[in-house]
Image (cartoon, rainbow, N blue to C red):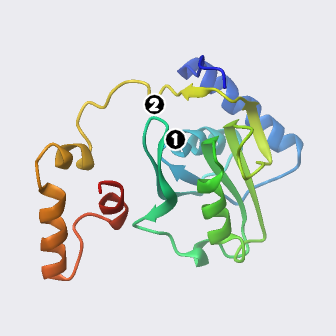
Amino acid sequence: MDHARETLTWDSFGDAAQQLAQVIADDGFRPDLILAIARGGMFVAGALGYALSVKNLHLMNVEFYNGVGSTLDMPVMLPPVPSAVDFSEKKVLIADDVADTGKTIELVRNFIAEHVADVRCAVVYEKPASLVKCDYVWKRTDRWINFPWSSLPPVLPGVLDALTRRPGAIKHLRAGSRRRGRSRIHQPYLISSG
């Protein structure tokens, strides 16, 4: 694999989203709603929503990457999980920033597939190893991608980052969650933090 990185700037993202929307429109697909996969897919869904005149946007939060090049064993839906009934008999466009392994898009597509009239996927980037071959792709690459929304370090640490700095914090939360019969941290964080 080429160790050079693909860099998408905000300006090039605007061009990519407009070109992707044009390909979708030229194909004749008119989605009733766009389903964004958080977090990178939110930007793609918003841009496509404007370009395709689709105001009905939904969000599904899926945890898979937990670091640069580091993933959970499988993607996991995080709450709140939308009701599949919300997509009933609709033409749905799933939007994400990248189809890397394809596992996230596959999870989301399988979640809604039985309920929708039609489901298609649009991504800015698709990697050759992706399990899912998306219907609409702006660019294919095998490089690691620097997106404008995730290239800079966070201003505030994430929940997991803050917890891992405190010795025993995860173990303490697990024990407390069992005593109360509910979890304060969603299970994927417990799995990914050992």
Q: Which of the two discs, 1 and 2, labels the residue nearer the N terminus?
A: 1
Is residue 154 toward the left or the right of residue 59 in the image?
left
Which residue is drawn at the image coordinates 76% and 48% (left, top)? 134
| Quadrant housing residue 153 | top left
Q: CA distance from mark 1 to mark 2?
A: 8 Å
Residue located beneath label 2 in the image: 149
Q: Secondary structure at mark 1?
A: helix
Is residue 187 toward the left or the right of residue 17 in the image?
left
Horizontal and vertical percent position of residue 65: 46, 46
Within 10 angstroms of label 1, few (less than 14), some, or many (20 or more) residues?
Answer: some
Horizontal and vertical percent position of residue 6: 61, 21
Identify the amino acid type marked 1.
Answer: Gly
| Quadrant housing residue 52 | top right
Q: Disc number at residue 133? A: none
Residue located beneath label 1 in the image: 40
Asked if disc 1 and disc 2 are in contact, CB closer than 8 Å, the reply is: yes
| Quadrant housing residue 47 | top right
Which residue is drawn at the image coordinates 11% and 55% (left, top)? 168
Which residue is drawn at the image coordinates 32% and 65% (left, top)? 186
